[in-house]
Image (cartoon, grey):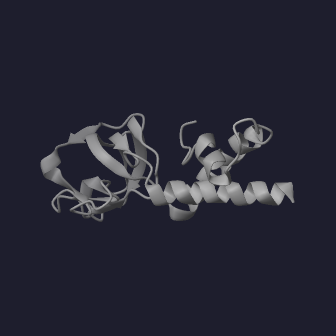
Amino acid sequence: MAGDLCTRDQVRRFLVKASSDTAQNDLIDELIPRASRMIAGHCEREFTPTADATRLFYYDGSGFLSLDPYDLRTVTSITFDVEPGESQTVITPAEYRLRPLPAPDGVFQSIRFQVSRAPGGPWSDRTIAIRGAWGFETVPEDVQDAAIKTVAVWLRRDAA
């Protein structure tokens, strides 16, 4: 399932379940999305990849835009004024910088806009649509491990 931080097989391997023991498969399948949402929400990160999506943000004109809770891999386009009836403006890569640089996890968490476009003025309090690739390219191993162990702990509590 999209957004899942681990798989049933990974949980089963961690629990050292025999291939014939499928009694908890449905429960594992139910718990994985719950654990994945909990971990992503707690970390305020987007650990699973989305190849092409548009996300909307409100921009206050400060020159800085936090992308929380999303993580951006690549930008296809950034468009200001996407509300109905507004005159849309697509900005060029020369008018913004993705942060942090370098991106240690391969994702960006904020954008700095060109100063002449940013503070107050006509660009303040606008809706921005950012189209691009979101989330980590692959789920980080430590995040996968946390999801596997969370599901395993929940399963053991259920069995008790």
Residue at the spot 63% in from the left edge and 41% down from the top edge: 8
> 77 or 72, which lies in front?
72
**Which residue shows up at 66% across the image and 46% down it?**
12
Q: Is residue 81 above or below residue 144?
A: above
Question: Horizontal placement of 22 versus 62: left or right?
Answer: right
Q: Nearer the viewer, residue 83 or 63?
A: 63
**Residue 129, position as x, y percentages in the image:** 36, 42
The mark tally for this picture is 0
| 88 vs 95, nearest the viewer | 95
* Left or right of 47 in this view: 115: left
In the rendered image, the quadrant that contains the C terminus is bottom right
> Relative to residue 103, is residue 34 depicted above or below?
above
Residue furthest left in the image? 94
* 65 relative position to 115: left or right: right
Residue 146 falls in which quadrant of the image?
bottom right
Q: Is residue 83 above or below residue 110?
A: above
Q: Quadrant of the N terminus?
A: top right
Q: Position of residue 19 (x, y in %)?
A: 69, 37
Residue sitting at x 32%, y 54% = 107
Residue name at image x 25 percent, y 40 percent: 89
| Residue 117 coordinates in the image, percent (x, y) | 19, 56
Residue 69 in picture, x, y percent from top left: 47, 57
